[in-house]
Each structure stands twice: as C-alpha cells, then as structure tokens.
Image (spheres, rainbow, N blue to C red):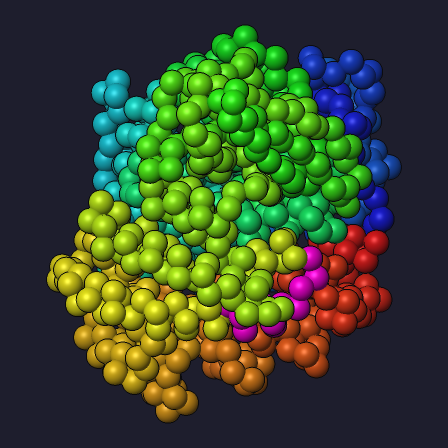
Amino acid sequence: MSQAPATAILLEDYAPTPYVTKETFLDFELQSEYTLVHSRLTIVRNEKSNSDSNTLILNGSELELLSVSIDGKVLTDSDYVLNSETLSINVDKDAFVLECTTRIYPDKNTALEGLYISGGMYCTQCEAEGFRRITYFQDRPDVLSVFTTRINADVEQYPVALSNGNLVSQTIENGRVIAEWHDPFPKPSYLFALVAGDLVCQEDAFITQSGRNIALKMYVEQENEHKCEHALESLKRSMKWDEEVYGREYDLDLFMIVAVDHFNMGAMENKGLNIFNSSCVLATPETATDEAFARIEGIVGHEYFHNWSGNRVTCRDWFQLSLKEGFTVFRDAEFSADMGSRAVKRLEDVSFLRQHQFPEDAGPMAHAVRPSSYMEISNFYTVTIYEKGSEVVRMLRTMLGEQLFRKGSDLYFDTFDGQAATTDDFVWAMEQVSGQDLTQFKRWHSQAGTPRLSISREFNESEKTLTISAKQHTPPSADHSPKEPFVIPVQLGLIDDQGRALQEITYDASYSSDNQVWLVTQEEQSITFSNLETMPVVSLLRDFSAPVLLMDDLSDQERVLLIGSDSNGFNRWEQCQIIYKKMILQGVTDSVDDALFSALESALKQLLVDKKVENAVKAELLKLPAEVELLQLSPKVDILAVAASRKRLMSRLAAALSATLTSLYQTLPVTEVYRFDSESVGIRKLKNELLELLILSDGDQYIERASAQFTQANNMTDQLAALRLLVKYGSEQVYQDALDRFLDQWESDAQVLEQWFRVQMVRTDDKALDRVSALLNHRLFEYQNPNKVRAVIGAFAMGNIEGFHAEDGSGYHFLGMQVETLDALNPQIAARLVGPLVKWQSYDDARGQKMKAVLTQLAGKELSKDLYEVVNKSLV
Ligand code: PHE
Ligand code: ZN
C-alpha cells in the first residue's frame, strides 16, 4: 500500500507532455504465477507541447521492471530514474521505439485495478489509472495511441482471449492460444482491455443505418449462458437509438460485452470490449427484478453511448471527467425515458439526485462538476460528476431547445472526433449553433454547491399583473469555489384555479415562450406577466429544469390543486413530495396538520382511481421521500425522529386510504407471462407498493398474501418484493423461514445471492447490527467481492437508518472497522464505503461527534491514498 502523499493535482497545472506514444504493441504472457508484459511503444515529440524538455515520463506502479530499451539499446539503471510512481528517461531523439518488459501478479491483485483475476478469468480495469499497473506508459487521457495486443495463454484454461478492436489472428501452439487484436482507433490507455478465460459466447448482430453488419458477442461463464438475452436486446436498442437521436453509428465490425463477478463499479466502456459487473448485465425474469432489468438497459446503453461520448471524443485530463460522464448519463437517461415511462424515469432521477448528490454538494467532499483539484482521481467518480453533470447538459438542452441542441452535439462530435476535449469545448459547440453567450452558464462547471432558489409572487389586481421574484443564493462549499450567480432555467406554467393553462399572457425577454423557460441569471430578478383576470397558480421548475433547492410561496391549497391538475406530470409528483416532507417535519416536532392531511388524502384518492394516470406513477405518488431529504429542509434534525415520523405518516396514510388501496389492489390486472414493458412493470410496481401499505393497514391477512406471492411468484420482481415485505414486517419466524427458503432455492446464483444478502438490511428492529455482523461470517460472504461488500455493509450503512444511526454509536464504530479492513484489500471500495460517515456535519451535534470520532480514529491509521483523501477532507 502506498504511503499517503499530501499532494493535490491541480487543473491549472495542466500541460501537454513533450512526447506522445503513437503506437503501442503489447504482448501478454499469462503464466500461472505471474504475467509478463512486453511492450513496444512508438514515441514522437508532441506537436501540442511547447516544452523543449527531453525527459520522457512514464507512469508505473506496483510493477517489476525486467528490462527497458530504446531503439534496441538496452538501458541500465544509470540511464533512467525509477521510483514507485514513474520511470523517467532522458532521450535526445525526436522519434524512437521504447521496449519494456514488466512482471505483474494478477492473482494477488485485490484492488481490481489493472490486470486481475475474477473467478478464474483474467480481466482488466484501466480507468482511470489502472493501465500503469500493467506496464510503464504515458497513462493519461490526452495521449492517444493505436493498440495492437497479443495474448499468449494456456488454451485449456483460457481458450477465449480478447482485447480491443478486431481479431487479427488466433493460433494454438504447444497448448497455448496466441491471439492478436488490433484496434484502429487511437485511444488513451484507460480504454484498453484484455480478457482471457473459459467463456461461452452468445452472438447477435446489428445492421447500422448505413447498412454495415456488426457482430455482437457477449461472453460469460457457462452457467450464465441463459442470462444474456436482455443485455443483447438492450444493446441493439441502444445502437438504434443513438443513430436516430444523435445520428451516431457504430464504427468497428465487432462489439463485445463481457460479464465479470469482481468489479469495483457498474461497467466499463473499453473500446469494442465493454466489461460489466455481472450484476449489471446478467438477467432472466426468474432471477432479476424489473428494477434490475431497467438498470441493465440503462447501463448497457450508457457504455455503448460512450463509444462516441468518451471514446471517439475523449477527455483531455481527468478534471474533464464529466465531459464524458455527465453527457453520457444524460444520453442514457433519455434513452431509458424513451424505452419506458418518461415521467417515472425523471422523478426517479430527481429523487436520486436529491438523496445522493445534494448531500455530497453540501458536505466536505463537495466539488464542482469540473473540479480544480484532486488527490486520488478514483474518488471523483461521484454523483456530482455523473448526475449533476447530466443535469448541466439537460439545462443546456432546455435552454437551446431540442433541435439546436442536436446541432450542437453534431458540431461537437465532428469537431473533436479523435481528440481529447474539455467541457469548455462542449459549451463552445453549443454557443456556435445557438449564438447564445454561455460564459455565465459555465459557472455550473466551475462552482460547486446547490443553489437555493427562493421564489415569491405578487398579484396586482388593478393592473392584472403577476410579478414573480427570484432570489438565488449558494452557500460556501468545502472546495472554496467562488459563488457568482448561476444561470437557472426555470421552466414554468401559469394555470387558473380550475387547473387550466393560461395562454394569453405577455412577458419580457427573459422568458422564452417556445420552451416556457424563464432564465434567472441575477442574484435577484423578477418577471411580470400581464393580462391576468385572476391570480394564477404557478407551476414552477417543471421537470426539475435546474438542480436547485427551490423554496416557493405556494399555499397548501395551491399545491393540492397542482397535484390534481398540473399538466406537468413531474410537478404533480413533486408537489405531493413537498406536502409529505412538510408533514413528516410536522410530525417530528408536533403533530401533522389534519386539514393538510385530509386535503392530500382526497387528492390521492382521486388520482389513484384516475385511469389516465400510469400505474407506475401511482406507485411513486404513494412513496414517501427519503429521510436524508428532510435534512436538507431542516438542518441537523434528529434523523431517527425523522424516520419514526415518516413511518407514522406512512401508517396513517395506509389507514386513511385503505378502502381505495384495497379495491385498487383487487382490480389490478395479473401479469401472467413476464414481460419487460412499461405497462407490466407499472402493474407489478403498483401491486407491490400497495401490498406494503395494506400490510401496514390490515396486517396479518396481507402478510399471508406476501407469503403466498413469495412461494408462487414466477418472476424475481414479485418474489423479491414479497421477501422484502416478509423480512421487514414478518414475525421472527416468518422472515427467517422465508430467507432460508430463498437461500435454498438460489444459493448457486450469484446475482440472486447478492439480493439475499441485501434484503436482510431492510429489517429495522434493534438487531440489525447483529445480523450484519453474522452475515460477514456467512460461508458465502467474501470480502474480496465488492458486490457482496456493498450488499451487506453498504446496504446497512445506507439503508438501515435505525441500525446505522443507533444512539450508542455502534453502527458508526462498526463501519469504521470494516472500512479499515477493506482498505488493505481494495482502497477504492473502502473510500466509497466510508461515505455515510463523511457527512457527519449534517447530523445533530451529538450524533455528528460520534461519527467524527470514528473518522478521527481512522485518520490516525496508515491509509491508502484513496481513503486518506476522503477521511482527511471530512475532518477539515
Ligand atoms: N467509466 C465507467 C462508466 O461510467 C465507470 C468506471 C470508472 C468503471 C472507473 C470503472 C472504473 O461507464
Ligand atoms: Zn460512464
């Protein structure tokens, strides 16, 4: 483990390298104890650099250097400087060939970066800086090279040997397979991939819009052969969608997907050879929930879309990470919206943003979408880079409108194809096509923090005008980014007291009637609408048109009216959420306002029987906001009191709506044959949501329903939903019994087993910590498998509020110990897992101090660079 250096990498220090590697030839000899990597690099001076330095700096870490030569001349250790991170060589040539041999130990690699072994197969993970654990290289995204890769491995154990691009040749000699791959597209090293194993292949094909035939191959372990169909179908849908919506066609003749069990993240977009965490790609109706089906579709799309947004146009440096990730998340979100329910996708994404990104942006790890400094780049694969980054792209589309946005994206891809670009380049393209000056807009890239947007209204009866005033304020952030006013596109609509949209209104230039957007650019700003007979109700921030914390002056009655009649589906749900939050907070300090409760109750009763409202939306309307969202409205509120109040409200709602819920439950159609389409998904989602509420209102009878559903279900959505309810609400006997039966049934299925671990964390009695500790000793638990670690430790710390935040601090202490253990195995996972402690300052003081104490203890230990950065920033 590397000793933590206290140095930060700064955006302002960016400079092109004096040399670049144009061609890369790699030869991997996979031996049983180790791997030998021979490289031959064609290196020339960099035209983009104005440095006259003669020093070639190659990155390398945890490598054994066996030999290095330049133009055939072997170097001795006086010819170079070698330390634990770099190999520096003075070269007085403008073009040369560097050859190098390193020895690495994939079977000892538990960090899962570079070349490692997962369940008997070799695979790589090179983003962001994993390639340097394979060989000495200019391991940075602005060095693009054409790769040729030869793999030499035992043919019995590793008959399948894959790398990027096209297969050039494959032979078998002396019991060894020798496969050579060539990728004609120049790429940075982080997109390199290699896989070798005993894998089976599911094949399919796609014909592009220009008529080219692309072979699609999905490689998995034998036992997973039947779990490929959904991913392959999702892939074909993605390929078609990117052609239709962005005009982007696939470029190689072959596209491969590989599933591996040990993976730090969801998936990786390596050129032509995407590698997936098996839980994010393998599915059958019997083993995967609707949620998993949707996630897989989204991730397959995401990785595929990277072929253009990330690979053909890549990032200049890691500060630009959101250039590929924010844009690609936006692309996959729109893809998912087009494939399923648009309204549900949007509100799910907004909930996710508020539950995860807003807290990050208010905490000690807050950073801008384009950060200006980092210590360990792995720590910056964050919800801010991904999800807020996507919101920033979405705002651009909202401001430009669909057509100009598409023009801008075409210009971006055409201009920067084959290059390493910046977020400024992306904005430049949008400026070119729209003529808009987006200078101020770029603050969304450079400034961290969630703006608070306060809106107030004034109606002037004699003038028949409505003036809407906005004030924006962004609190200071941990990264000390400046806070100048943001450009906030507020999508809005005016409706009358019957819920009808008002048409004949006039407005000033800050309002665009085409896309109904009011651009708020100042700290304080107002807009006046005229020709209004009566005071209209305003529907603000439709579709969550900007990632802000909105405080408006709507009355409860107005909100209820919007819930019933806003034409914007998102805002109907949003107003409902606002009322839930208000009532949860009322319940923390006092009691819930009965009039408000009844008003919401009748609005919900109407919506639940409204045939025009999608089932999935009905299910979402019945879900209460997550506890952390209340911390944003009422800082330092006692989280356990919030959880208790939330539970009481849910029970009260269940009781009040009982009759409506029962008849809805009884009349929902049955989905006999499993289909993954938005209608069937909606039915299952609503049915299972209703079942929970019915358990709350009517108890035993519905616990039995859940038991029956658990036994009879023909798909994992229904089976797992039932199991979850039995675990959450069943007697000790009932839930234990269900868990045992589930394990019996599914023990040999890695994806379902993960769910078995995870589901146990939803029970919120006072034995949660005992249960999680017992699971860590379970014969099927493995610390080396990130999915299992996340399913047990992660699910406990993030999903079990009562257990994790127990008054005695035992949950915090437990997490601290686990993080320390994991840091020795897998620093990236340790640094992620510590997340729930890092936000200690948002909790009430007593709790916060207990969390902080655990962090302080950790800070005294010898930590990986990853964990060191997070822990120390959280204590500043
Ligand atoms: N680039 C991957 C994605 O977003 C995520 C990833 C990052 C995977 C780092 C592994 C390591 O699709
Ligand atoms: Zn991505």
Q: Quadrant of the rendered structure where residue 241 is?
A: top left
Number of numbered tags placed on the structure image: 0
Q: Name the image quarter holding the C terminus.
A: bottom right
Q: Position of residue 409 (x, y in %)?
A: 46, 19
Q: Name the image quarter holding the N terminus.
A: bottom right
**Is residue 170 depicted above or below 582 in this figure?**
above
Q: Quadrant of the rendered structure where residue 502 is?
A: top left
Q: Residue furthest front?
A: 462
Residue 501 as seen in the image, left or right of residue 389:
left
**Is residue 689 depicted above or below 775 in this figure?**
above
Camera sees residue 867: no
Q: Position of residue 125 (x, y in %)?
A: 54, 47
Residue 640 highlighted magenta (yes or no): yes
Q: Residue at x 23, y 35 (%)?
A: 205
Residue 74 as seen in the image, left or right of residue 631:
right
Q: Residue at x 33, y 32 (%)?
A: 500
Q: Position of residue 586 (x, y in %)?
A: 57, 64
Residue 719 as seen in the image, left or right of residue 757:
left
Q: Position of residue 490 (x, y in %)?
A: 52, 29
> Which of the pair 703/525 is nearer the observer?
525
> Which of the pair 311/572 is nearer the observer?
572
> Which of the pair 641/163 is nearer the observer?
641
Camera sees residue 738: yes
Residue 760 highlighted magenta (yes or no): no
Q: Which residues are magenta?
A: 635-646
> Which of the pair 589/628 is nearer the observer?
589
Residue 22 as seen in the image, left or right of residue 475:
left
Q: How would you classify the magenta stretch by its main secondary structure? A: helix
Q: Residue at x 31, y 67 (%)?
A: 657
Q: Quadrant of the rendered structure where residue 756 is?
A: bottom left
